[in-house]
């Protein structure tokens, strides 16, 4: 704006213009200890709306992230230029964040006993995943869902890699965190903590970080070498995205944990709008799947479903949240797909008609 205002001042001096299209206000500025009166241009450049800076990962970038967390190249081969550690842990928790939409605090301080059981058979219907009140935002319990594949990966990590890391671990929380909280007789609901029965629901993130498992090591799902709790997920996602951008895809964005939540929201909305979950529910209607979940997927309004999964207090919050993401594409694709299937929309004819509009522009 300052350059443009100088241009207009030159134009006025040369008598090419009679006035500036700007207004000013008087202000006092300090230069090298000396104050003087200046004019401040009240015109400002347009700034991006908040939604412009909030992004999510498209399917191809989601797959790049998942492979990157596993130490793989985009084609699925081993990335020979990378020698990372704890790749099974990073992949399991990364897939879990993408599949559940849980916030950073929620998946960081999850305990192994709070992970739901894996269905006996693979299923295309999402699996309910309770989010404990003790780690949820506002301490408000909710149930989100996950995919069978992501849940299986989490179980695989807990039962194999994590078990090997924590076996015989002598880890204890540092003194600055407070006294160790020794866990015995754990089950799905709670356990004895320093001899007192407590539910997992009642434990805050700070308390969970101090828990010591019966077999040794931290009680958090994700652990590091030596058995201590691992919480530096922002660093894991940042380094992975930096590596992908530097080695394979310059357009790959910076990924922070909350971007996984945005990605979950967009993918889930797309599935809900296109009827993906309704079709999945039909496939398992006659099986032993959760009847309430099948009904929920078949009948509920997409915004109501997404509101509950994300833990928003009202649908209005969900609507405002979605306005900050590009949902236009989802509804457009759903409209075109439904119209084509019903024989109501001829997409090819529409493309030809649109092309003809541009073909005729020179002769208009």
Image (tube, helix red, strand yellow):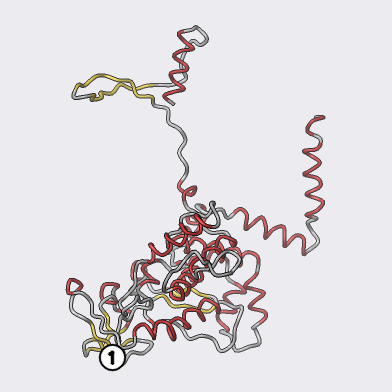
Locate residue 337 relative to residue 165 in the image: left or right. right
Query: Which residue is at the front of the view, 42 or 247?
Result: 247
| Residue drawn at 47 percent across, 10 percent down | 12
- Pointer 1 local density, CA inside 10 Å: few below 14, some 14–19, many at least 20: some
The quadrant of the picture occupied by the N terminus is top left
| Residue drawn at 56 percent across, 53 percent down | 326
Residue 42, given in percent of the width and then of the height, sits at 39, 26
Q: Which residue is mark 1?
A: 184
Q: Is residue 48 above or below residue 134?
A: above
| Residue drawn at 44 percent across, 85 percent down | 160
Residue 258, given in percent of the width and then of the height, sits at 43, 61
Disc 1, SS: strand
Query: Which residue is at the front of the view, 284 or 187?
Result: 187
Q: Is residue 306 visible?
A: no
Q: Is residue 57 above or below residue 161?
A: above
Q: Residue furthest front?
A: 80
Q: Is residue 356 above or below residue 258?
A: above
Query: Which residue is at the front of the view, 274 or 7?
Result: 7
Q: Is residue 55 above or below residue 5?
A: below
Q: Quadrant of residue 131?
A: bottom left
Q: Is residue 267 visible?
A: yes
Residue 192, given in percent of the width and then of the height, sits at 26, 89
The quadrant of the picture occupied by the C terminus is top right
Residue 63, given in percent of the width and then of the height, sits at 56, 65
């Amino acid at each position: 704006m300052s350059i443009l205002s100088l241009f207009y001042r030159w134009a006025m001096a040369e008598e090419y213009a009679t006035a500036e299209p700007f207004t000013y206000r008087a202000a006092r500025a300090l230069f090298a200890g000396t104050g003087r009166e200046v004019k401040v241009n009240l015109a400002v450049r347009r700034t991006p709306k908040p939604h412009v800076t909030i992004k999510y990962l498209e399917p191809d970038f989601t797959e790049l992230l998942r492979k990157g967390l596993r130490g793989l190249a985009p084609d699925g081969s081993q990335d020979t230029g990378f020698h990372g550690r704890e790749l099974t842990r990073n992949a399991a928790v990364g897939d879990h964040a993408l599949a559940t939409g849980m916030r950073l605090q929620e998946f960081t301080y999850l305990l192994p006993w709070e992970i739901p059981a894996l269905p006996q058979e693979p299923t295309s219907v999402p699996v309910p995943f309770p989010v404990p009140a003790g780690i949820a935002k506002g301490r408000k319990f909710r149930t989100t869902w996950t995919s069978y594949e992501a849940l299986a990966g989490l179980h695989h990590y807990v039962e194999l890699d994590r078990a090997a890391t924590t076996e015989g671990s002598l880890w204890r929380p540092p003194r600055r965190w407070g006294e160790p909280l020794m866990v015995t007789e754990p089950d799905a609901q709670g356990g004895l903590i320093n001899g007192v029965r407590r539910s997992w629901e009642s434990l805050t993130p700070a308390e969970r970080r101090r828990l010591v498992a019966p077999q040794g090591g931290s009680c958090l799902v994700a652990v590091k070498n030596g058995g201590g709790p691992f919480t530096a997920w922002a660093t894991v996602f940042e380094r992975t995205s930096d590596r992908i951008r530097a080695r394979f895809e310059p357009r790959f964005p910076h990924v922070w944990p909350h971007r996984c939540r945005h990605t979950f929201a967009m993918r889930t909305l797309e599935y809900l709008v296109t009827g993906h979950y309704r079709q999945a529910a039909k496939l398992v209607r006659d099986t032993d799947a959760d009847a309430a979940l099948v009904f929920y997927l078949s009948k509920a309004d997409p915004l109501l479903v997404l509101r509950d999964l994300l833990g928003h207090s009202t649908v209005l919050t969900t609507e405002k949240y979605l306005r900050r993401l590009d949902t236009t594409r989802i509804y457009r694709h759903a409209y075109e797909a439904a119209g084509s299937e019903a024989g109501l929309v001829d997409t090819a004819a529409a493309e030809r008609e649109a092309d003809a509009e541009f073909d005729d522009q020179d002769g208009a």
